[in-house]
Amino acid sequence: MPYIFNEDIIREIRESNDIVDVISEYVTLKRTGSNFVGLCPFHNEKTPSFSVSPSKQMYHCFGCGEGGDAISFIMKYANLDFVEALKLLANRANIVLDEKEANVDSKTEREKEIILNINRETARYFFDNLLDDNNALKYLYNRGINKKTIKAYGIGYAKNSWDGVLSFLLKKGYSEEQIEKAGLVIKHSDGNRYYDRFRGRVMFPIIDTRGRVIGFGGRTIADAQPKYLNSPDTPVFSKGNNLYGLNTAKKYSRNRIILVEGYMDVVSLYQNGINYSVASLGTALTANQSKLLKRYSNDIYICYDSDNAGLNAASRALDIMKEEKINAKVIFLPDGKDPDDFIKENGSNRFEHFLNNSLNYLDFKILFYKKRYNLNTLEGKIDFTKEISNMLKQIESPIELDAYINKVSLETNISIDAIREEIREKQRGQTNSAIKDKYINTNYRNTNKYNILPVKYNLEPGHLMAEKNLLNFLIKDKKIFDHIKDRFRPDDFLEQVYRRAAEIIFDIYNNEEEIHQDEITIHFEGEELEKLKEVINLESDFGEDEKIKAVEDYIKKINYYELKIRKNDIKEQIADIQNNKARIKGDVEKLIRELCLELIEIDKELKLHQ
């Protein structure tokens, strides 16, 4: 039986293979403006006439006329047929194809078609509701959104009714099971009734780049919780693989796209003439979303809230984009503002001022770690300098490196020579080398957990179990998050996988009332994913009061183990100082005395935790 690939599989393979990356494996390309050029591989030429467009994901040779997408390039270059080229690119993107996957599953395709039809009908229903509801319209008008923008994004309203959407779609001939599969209704616990998922909310249709309504986001206009509610994953919708507003942004992007956090940020920017922004869909940015952004723009700007949570999210998004070889920048707005509030209060000209002064990867990280560490203390200066030195070691340009070393030196009053030596040691992979001077290499009273584990210590079984159980409780119960959020942070987890999972959980709970497991697992793979599934599958039969008591015990155990780590770390530092007295600048005895005082304090705390 011949292979027949359905459109979604072909689209997934195209979107997973950036055309510039693919062609660069066979042709030397050089950036020229927004495109890349090189010598055409299909005819002999001395002057480059072969052009590749990242935004269009197409290539064209102005000399011989050849052109197409990544699939057609592989077919032509390697002399392969369509199926062979598709398999090659699928393998390149780690997409598994077999005969069963390749042949069209007519039942699955029909199911997707029905869901898309249901979504389209529902989007129209919500839009008509909005125009008939004065309260919902007034809410949007008060937020500065006019009718033109409402129409551009198809914004609607879900009536405050238990069965508004359900009744509407049943009359259209769809079954309750089909409407549930589209994520628009929820089955009652009695197993016999269904009710609307979205009630009393302004609705934002999520539209893909092919113009299809694939899901919805709803924002309450009252005080209901959660404030934002999104469609669950369905056969046509995956939060981690799509972006709100991309269908509009791609029309106006001018080869730049702004990534924001919320639907209202996108809509408010559009309202004020910034019509090329997109938003992730209730989760932290994923690698797949980064790949999707890369297809449509070379210049990505991250503009999250400028409070601590927003800065943390921007830092993680930058790291994800860096892994995808995207040189993103961060628009840092003042006074903790989000894009929605800022542009309404200050206008597009002021917003573009901050856009034009956006921060590259290193400049943002310097700002980020300045806020994390207290540079008024010696300890803060040490931790800050170590963090930044670890990044500076990757800079290849001596001029650029020199500029950043000078910048860090001015921020910390640590000598240029000391910073340069720290970078050299990190480049040689000797992060635990002998102490060279008081400021850089004597890292006493270090509370930076990212440097403590897992390099030097193996977690004890009891401590590891405490972290597992606490994380399990967090995933399954927002009340636990509310109980501990002000005194226990994600970076208090010492196991790296649990820490990353906790960061995602805290981000989600800051916007929603519950977590779907796939919102967390989508960020992990391989052994890390198995480790996380182990946590998710833990079961307990604690009552509410017992659960809170257990949480307190888990936190106590985690804090106790951290104190033991700090104690061992300080003892090692004292030994290092005593063995390297001749090479340490400053008052060595004073330094040892300070460390000994801290040991005494830690011993007191350890006794309290016993």
Image: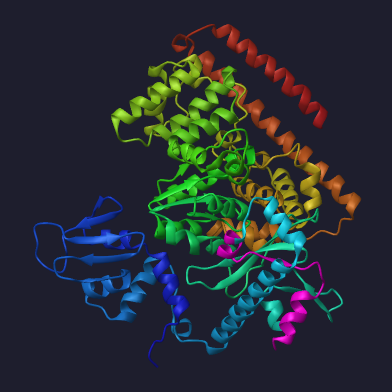
The one of 217 and 502 positioned closer to us in this rendering? 217
Please state, as top left, top right, bottom left or bottom right, where the C terminus lies in the image. top right
Q: Quadrant of the N terminus?
A: bottom left
In terms of image quadrants, where is residue 339? top right
> Quick check: 76 left or right of 344?
left
- Queried whether the magenta region covers residue 149, the answer comes back as yes
Report which quarter residue 601 is drawn in.
Answer: top right
Up/down of 335 relative to 499, above or below = above
137 sits to left or right of 70: right
Q: Position of residue 161 (x, y in %)?
A: 82, 70
- In this view, the residue in front, 468 or 325, is 325
Q: Which residues are magenta?
A: 148-176
Q: Residue at x 15, y 57 (%)?
A: 48
Q: Position of residue 419 (x, y in %)?
A: 42, 22
Rendering coords of residue 473 (x, y %):
77, 53
Q: Which residue occupies the foreground of this view, 426 or 155? A: 155
Its colouring scheme is rainbow
Whether 171 is drawn above or below 592: the answer is below
Q: Is residue 159 visible from the viewing direction of this image?
A: yes
Residue 599 among those drawn in magenta: no
Kindly tell me whether residue 515 is visible in this rendering: no
Q: In which image quadrant can residue 540 be found? A: bottom right
